[in-house]
Image (cartoon, helix red, strand yellow):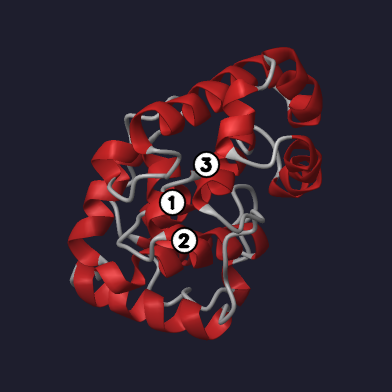
Amino acid sequence: MRKKDLASEVIKRLWKEYPDSVCTLDADSAWKMLISVRLAAQCTDKRVNETVPFLYEKFDSPKKIADAPLSEIEEIIRPCGLHKSKARDIKACMTMLQNEYHGKVPDSMEELLKLPGVGRKSANLIMGDIFGKESYVCDTHCIRLSGRIGLSDGSKDPVKVEMQLRKCVPPEFSGGLCHRLVDHGRSVCKAQRPLCETCVLKDICKFGKNRKETLS
């Protein structure tokens, strides 16, 4: 099966299996999503969602965060871990938004990647979930499942996986597919002991078919 045909079938099945997949980070604006994504590094989305209301209660705009004492930001986001480096990036990011973008988050990949603490994963999430544009969020689940299914060559490099997905996944399904790969990775295609026997992709997944042949 060609990768484009495989991607089309994966999209069809995962949309049916997870019709309501969305990003699990709570953010109602682009600048808040920037902060949440940075906080989510080596932290659960649940913990981030529990923490950010305290930050916004005290500093409710990019300008206020840019002007806030670094120590106060650190203390509020401490539950998310790596609070010093995350606070430094968040303050620098909000400062750059103020100084160079009039307080508004840019809507292009090139400009987003200029912001402190923003990598391709974060930029793609902003592009898709906030601006509704083409986005390929290659987190650990997306990378693992893409390789197992056969949408990528098994590379662990997020940029390489992103470029391979861009070749076979239609732009209009890109963001939604990545969210569904996360849901499927958490519930079925786990890193350890994947539940291949109950997987909706078991007959088209390269990993699943190879595993079945090995066990038979």
Q: Which mark is residue 129?
A: 2
Which residue bears the numbered disc 3? 34
Whether the residues at callouts 3 and 1 have beta carbons within 8 Å, the answer is yes
Residue 157 visible within the image: no
Q: Nearer the viewer, residue 61 or 81?
A: 61
Q: Circle 2 — which element?
A: helix
Residue 164 visible within the image: yes
Q: How far from the left and from the top, in percent, is residue 42?
A: 64, 32
Q: Amino acid at mark 2?
A: Asp
- How far separated are the C-alphas under marks 1 and 2? 6 Å
Whether the residues at callouts 1 and 2 have beta carbons within 8 Å, the answer is yes
Query: Dot 3: within a 10 Å radius of its alpha carbon, few (fewer than 14), some, or many (20 or more) residues?
Result: many
Q: Nearer the viewer, residue 81 or 115?
A: 115
- Residue drawn 45% across the image and 42% down it: 122
Which residue bears the numbered disc 1? 126
Q: Circle 3 — which element?
A: helix
- How far separated are the C-alphas under marks 2 and 3? 11 Å
Label count reads 3
